[in-house]
Image (spheres, rainbow, N blue to C red):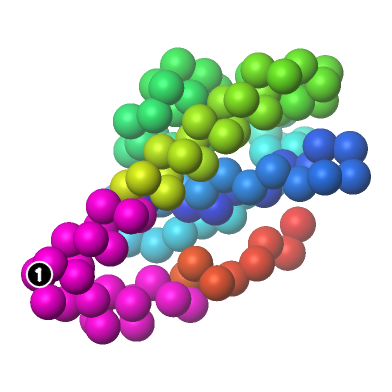
Amino acid sequence: MGRRHTQNFGRKSVTCYLYKTKVKHFEKLNVMNEQYAKDPRPFDENCGCPACRNYSRSYVRHLIKAKESLGMRLAVAHNLYFYNNLTRKIREALEGGYFESFYQKYRNILGERSQD
């Protein structure tokens, strides 16, 4: 799973989900904020997607600001990885008989909107 990360691309927004495994909560980031201009960290240190394994927040921010399609492709790759993992966890919760507790735990977290 990942924590949610929103990027403004012109008038559009791109959301990346990022998840902090150690603290078990979602964090929302807007990579277009100035604070990420020189941030060498990946979207999520605990994510195994190609975007997080190979690229920094600052580089993806640069790509998006420069309107390079790779920036959006990396954000989409991260989101797909996030949703695949979320779907896997939902499937496990259904098969394990604990979906109701899973749902109660994640419904508010995933339903929150970024204030950026």
Q: Position of residue 114 (x, y in %)?
A: 67, 62
Q: Main secondary structure of the magenta part?
A: helix
Query: Neighbour class for label 1 at 10 Å: few (<14), some, many (≥20)?
Result: few
Up-down: is 79 above or below 112? above
- Residue at image coords 42%, 22%: 50
Q: Quadrant of residue 48?
A: top left
Please give the name of the residue rendered at 39% of the width and 72% of the height, measured from the top-left corner. 106
**Direction from residue 107 to residue 86 in the image, left or right:** left
Answer with the quarter of the image where residue 34 lies.
Answer: top right
Residue located at (48% from left, 77% from top): 108
107 inside magenta stretch? yes
Q: Which residues are magenta?
A: 86-108
Q: Residue furthest left?
A: 96
For badge 1, the amino acid type reads Gly
In the image, 111: left or right of 98?
right
For label 1, the residue is: 96
Q: Which type of secondary structure does the marked residue at label 1 adopt?
A: helix
How far from the left and from the top, in percent, is residue 5?
A: 60, 47
x, y percent for residue 38: 66, 24
Q: Of residues 9 and 24, which is closer to you in this image?
A: 9
Instruction: Determine the residue positioned at 57% across, 34% down.
Output: 76
Is residue 93 at least partly visible in the picture?
Answer: yes
Q: Position of residue 95 (x, y in %)?
A: 12, 67
| Residue at the right extreme of this rendering | 11
Name the quadrant of the C terminus: bottom right
